[in-house]
Image (tube, rainbow, N blue to C red):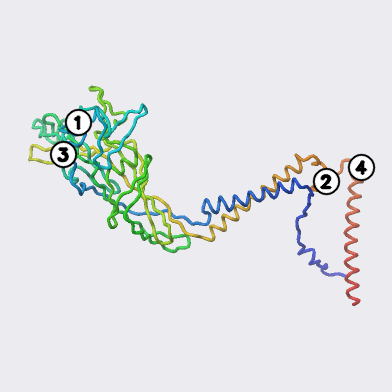
Amino acid sequence: HYGLPKIDWDSVFAYSTSKIVRIRHRFLGAFYYLAMLVIVAVIFGYYVAYMKGYYEYIAPTGDVEASVTQPVKPLQNVSSVAYCNNSTFNNLHRPYETVDDQHFAFKSESGTVIGPDGNLCGGNTSKRPCVSWTAAETSISQPSSVLVGTHIEESMWKVNDKCSRYSYGCQEWMPVGMPQLLYVGDVENYVINVEHALTPIHWDDGSEFVATPLKRNFVVIRGDATSVNTRVVGTIDRIPLHSLLKASGISLDACAPDSVEVTSNRSHSYRDVGLSILSTIRYHNPTRRRTVHSYIVKNAPMSASFTREERINATHKRQYVISGVRISFQVGGLFRRFNFKVLLITLVSGFALTAAATTFTDFLLCYVMRHREDYKLFKFEVTPDFDPDDNFEKMVLDKVVEEAGTRGEGREEGRETDEETCNEF
């Protein structure tokens, strides 16, 4: 009989499965199930519950505009401002009597008090005349930042008639006399007005998220030193400068590092040289559509100043070098929402750790337990050498193969007998 061989479809679509060996040992079993319990607890307790493994996250983007205004309430009397040279306050010999909530104490490592509650950096020699010019004259607003002036160096300049504008190596303007050094009085109560808006963002599925702020009367400012609250008027956050300084733990009258003059050996305060503060507007959404924000402030080791000029006539001008507090704003935080796909990925990746329980238990079984060699007889099945080196190994191989073939033929004969019996019925 010639033709195509008969195809055994049962063999073609045969299903291969793993062989399970059950080791009856209470310690091994308890260890395995305890490890599984710990892994499951880690998956649901840490990855799902604590790490919020069911949320999809997206970072917000937006624009920030800031400006500076003088305080709404009247400025402090100049006699109560410690750093003004016409002040009657003796800051060197008695503690500061609090007038407003912006005054706070700072202590050095030796325990001495510095700043507005104690010694000015440089003592009484650091006091200067104070002015109450408008915020537009002493401050400057830039994209996503603002500089609040605290110290002013005013100087007069005149045209150098000995050289022309295009003379190389010759300065067109030359100073006249000594500059006048001034402080901006009660600057701690100046207000930074921050207005910020978010751009629409899109989730992974393409749906758009338009942030709608929750209406609140205050906003939280968190820094390295403490947390404070500040007012919200409409869509504008009104942040007093003293709130930012208090949260970041800085006093304007504390000595700035690396600010000692070589000639006079006099240290300068932050009020003299200025400082920088990085403020992150951190957003999050407690509900699906509503958002809230707070401010996270950090000190940046940089001075801050800008120069402004006022032309008097064709030959004279005034120049103002204004140092102060530069506050830079950036948008940060995360928005989140429930996403079943993220939860599924978290669970699948977490349950992959369950293989560690089997690995550790097998290690104890094969390398630690007292009867480990006996356990290996049940766990591992070793075949004879299919490349025998001598007659004995060849004899063993032939015998094992013959027994395996006999068992296979017996199973085939049993199956044919069962089929014949079924056909008879």
Residue at the disc numbered 1: 127
Q: Residue at x 89, y 75 (%)?
A: 423
Residue at the disc numbered 2: 377
Above or below: residue 217 compared with residue 264: below
Task: Tell me the mark number nearer the camera, choosing from 4 and 2.
Answer: 2
Q: Amino acid at mark 4?
A: Phe
Q: Label 4 to label 2, Cα distance in Å?
A: 22 Å
Question: Where is residue 161 drawn, in percent x and y?
Answer: 8, 32
- State which tag comes first along the sequence, 2 or 3: 3
Above or below: residue 253 compared with residue 243: above
Element type at marker 1?
A: loop
Residue at the disc numbered 4: 392
Q: Amino acid at mark 2?
A: Leu
Whether residue 416 sits left or right of residue 20 in the image: it is right
Q: Quadrant of the C terminus?
A: bottom right
Whether residue 169 sits left or right of residue 117 in the image: it is left
Q: Label 3 to label 4, Cα distance in Å?
A: 109 Å
Question: Where is residue 149 drawn, in percent x and y?
Answer: 22, 40
Q: Nearer the viewer, residue 177 or 285?
A: 285
Task: Tell me the mark number nearer the camera, choosing from 3 and 4.
Answer: 3
Q: Residue at x 82, y 68 (%)?
A: 6
Element type at marker 4?
A: helix
Q: Nearer the viewer, residue 1 or 205?
A: 205
Question: Where is residue 370 drawn, in percent x and y?
Answer: 79, 39
Q: Amino acid at mark 1?
A: Lys
Q: Residue furthest bottom?
A: 425
Question: Where is residue 224 drawn, in percent x and y?
Answer: 38, 40
Whether residue 383 sits left or right of residue 47 in the image: it is right
Q: Label 2 to label 1, Cα distance in Å?
A: 91 Å
